[in-house]
Amino acid sequence: MNPTAGHCGVLYTDTHLSVRWSAADSSVILDGEVDVSNSAALATALAEARSERGEITVDTGALRFIDLAGLRALLAPASPAAGDAVRLRNVPPYLCRLMEMLDG
């Protein structure tokens, strides 16, 4: 799926997670659960989206669970040195708390 082609579609899907590109608002939408079993696939999908646009917005509103491997995959596309960023939208309270705990 080429995110800049103006299409809306699935970047990745398995029995626990769906990663979709929304051309309507140029975002990546996560739905389901991310853990060590699918975190590499998430990282690949986000890297593909980032390579097309640089900065990406990830909607995590439908994300029900994420472990440390998933959190690393979610934030891996951010490269401050290159000016790339990952913006999170609709962040569930549990994910806010997790990021606050890890931030120190």
Image (spheres, grey):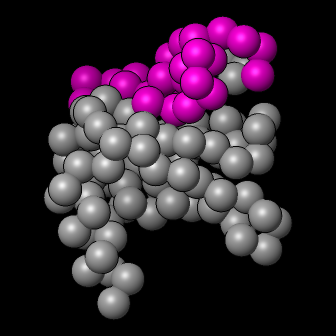
The x, y position of residue 84, in whole percent, is: 73, 58
Name the image quarter holding residue 18.
top left
Residue 90 in which image quadrant: top left
- The residue at 38%/60% (across/down) is 71
Left/right placement of residue 26 relative to residue 74 reads right
Q: Position of residue 104 (x, y in %)?
A: 33, 90
4 or 90, nearer to the observer: 90
Image quadrant occupied by the N terminus: top right
Q: In this view, does 61 lie above or below 67?
A: above
Q: In this rendering, is residue 25 above or below 69?
A: above
Determine the residue located farthest toward the right in the rendered image.
Answer: 82
In the image, residue 98 lies at what x, y percent?
A: 25, 69
Q: In this view, does 82 lie above or below 32?
A: below
From the viewer's perspective, is residue 56 above or below residue 7? below
Q: Quadrant of residue 70?
A: bottom left
Residue 74 coordinates in the image, percent (x, y): 47, 53
Would you say residue 27 sits in the magenta stretch?
Answer: yes
Q: What stretch is highlighted in magenta?
A: 4-29
Q: Is residue 24 visible?
A: yes
In this image, 86 relative to 31: left or right?
right
The residue drawn where x is 76% and y is 22% is: 4
Task: Tell me if residue 41 is in the magenta stretch.
Answer: no
